[in-house]
Image: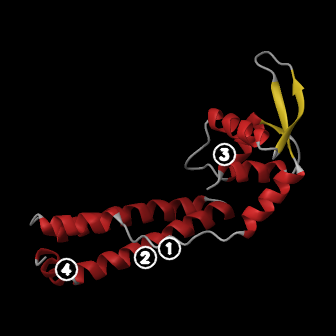
Amino acid sequence: MSIGHTLLGLLESGPRHGYDLKRAFDEKFGHDRPLHYGQVYSTMSRLLKNGLVEIDGIEAGDGPERKRYAITEAGVTDVRRWLATPEKPEPYLQSTLYTKVVLALLTRRDASELLDTQRSEHLRMMRMLTERKRKGDLADQLICDHALFHLEADLRWLELTAARLDRLAEAVTAR
């Protein structure tokens, strides 16, 4: 995810302080990985330097001055371009899980045990996400669905690999 573009998009609704941007980000996108304040301010500094935001006002407070940021026309154009650009699909051709299976076979370890353990971990995560989805709002339900679909694909791969394990062992140890 592009933090800069996300913060710019949040600014399109109106000027905000860094604290407000962090709170809005965490509420909409940061359920599992909230932003650190330092990340917000370093990103805003870079966006300011690049002309994508401007300082809309500065307020004195008990602590440091609070800057209010506003998006510029260049920032709006940048967000529009980013939203219109499709994300590159991730083919997962260099999977850690695949590497572990092949290394288990190469080192004469039990790859089927590895696959069983991984299957259990995937199912555990799917149960957690299903519960979160059940309790969540629509946005949370959609992000959980996204993760669940990826985990389901992984499970299909685990089953296929388990069914082909003998042939894979022959192929990787014959080299």
Query: Label 1 sits on what residue type?
Result: Phe
Q: Earlier in the sequence, mark 2 or mark 4?
A: 2
**Residue at disc 1, secondary structure:** helix
Binning the other alpha carbons within 10 Å of mark 2 as few (below 14), some (14 to 19) or many (20 upward) gives few
Real-space Cα distance between discs 2 and 1? 6 Å
Q: Which residue is mark 3?
A: 26
Q: Is residue 72 left or right of residue 35?
A: right
**Residue at disc 2, secondary structure:** helix
Q: Which residue is mark 2?
A: 153
Residue at 46% across, 59% down: 128
Real-space Cα distance between discs 3 and 1? 24 Å
**Residue at disc 3, secondary structure:** helix
Q: Are marks 2 and 3 in contact (CB under 8 Å)?
A: no
Q: Are marks 2 and 4 in contact (CB under 8 Å)?
A: no
Q: Is residue 103 left or right of residue 142?
A: left
Q: Are marks 4 and 1 in contact (CB under 8 Å)?
A: no
Q: Which residue is mark 4?
A: 168
Residue at 74% across, 65% down: 83
Image coordinates of residue 71 in percent, x first then y, are 85, 47
Q: Which image quarter: residue 146?
A: bottom right
Real-space Cα distance between discs 2 and 4? 20 Å
**On-image quarter of the C terminus:** bottom left
Query: Label 2 sits on what residue type?
Result: Ala
Binning the other alpha carbons within 10 Å of mark 4 as few (below 14), some (14 to 19) or many (20 upward) gives some
Query: Which label belongs to residue 149?
Result: 1
